[in-house]
Image: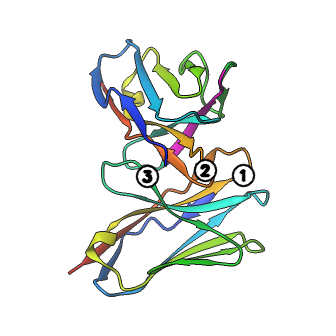
Amino acid sequence: SAVISQKPSRDICQRGTSLTIQCQVDSQVTMMFWYRQQPGQSLTLIATANQGSEATYESGFVIDKFPISRPNLTFSTLTVSNMSPEDSSIYLCSAWGQTNQETQYFGPGTRLLVL
Amino acid sequence: RKEVEQDPGPFNVPEGATVAFNCTYSNSASQSFFWYRQDCRKEPKLLMSVYSSGNEDGRFTAQLNRASQYISLLIRDSKLSDSATYLCVVDTGRRALTFGSGTRLQVQP
């Protein structure tokens, strides 16, 4: 299995500021993803983090608001820019297992509260 | 129309009961199907993949009907520890997952 860690685990931020979330996988993985889970809702895909190229964003999500970096096969960052209270959510990164390609593993999530 | 639809529940069942969850998906090109389990304030974890032939893992049985675009999960002999939200999940082939809204199960003593 892939072990995924995220930092920070939680944060409280002021509106208008930005927060960068880090995701570290314990093995090299081809694909990494960022999801958002708003209060009381299920997960929504934000983007696919591509190593060595720009991330692929889903409808409703843009690079200026959620810039993503993927400098290598084990690490990615998601920045939530110019935050508003509507960005209060849990942000999760994920990756398919290297040996078990049928399982997508998730990090523990970053709980963000924007005041 | 949502891409993946589930009854949100909650399903309140006594210990030992059998409970079934259903899910429908709209994209006929979907290739892979899963049930994930999410405990309160935790990340989702894979419960089982779902195959056209159906598959069973202990007390859990999953079925897929591609013609009807319908997925099911059956839990037999429910335990208190089964209380969680069950997420129906679809991969349309891009290797990114689309989640249903989840069905909440509460098993009561």
Give the side of residue B32 with respect to residue A106, left or right: right
Question: Which amino acid, by three-letter code, is at mark 3?
Answer: Pro
Question: Which amino acid, by three-letter code, is at mark 1?
Answer: Thr
Q: Nearer the viewer, mark 2 or mark 3?
A: 3
Q: What residue did someone put label 3 on?
A: B44
Q: Which range is magenta?
A: A43-51
Q: Is residue A110 above or below residue B7?
A: above
Q: What residue did someone put label 2 on?
A: B98
Query: Alpha-carbon distance for marks 2 and 3?
Result: 13 Å
Please tell me which of labels 2 and 1 falls first in the chain.
Answer: 1
Question: Which amino acid, by three-letter code, is at mark 2?
Answer: Thr
Helix, strand or loop at mark 2: strand
Q: What residue did someone put label 1 on?
A: B92
Chain ID at mark 2: B
In the image, residue A61 lies at what x, y percent?
A: 60, 28
Q: Is residue A26 magenta?
A: no
In the image, residue A42 lies at what x, y percent?
A: 47, 50
Q: Is residue A115 visible?
A: no
Q: Residues within 10 Å of mark 2 (few under 14, many from 20)?
A: many
Give me the disc on residue A91.
none
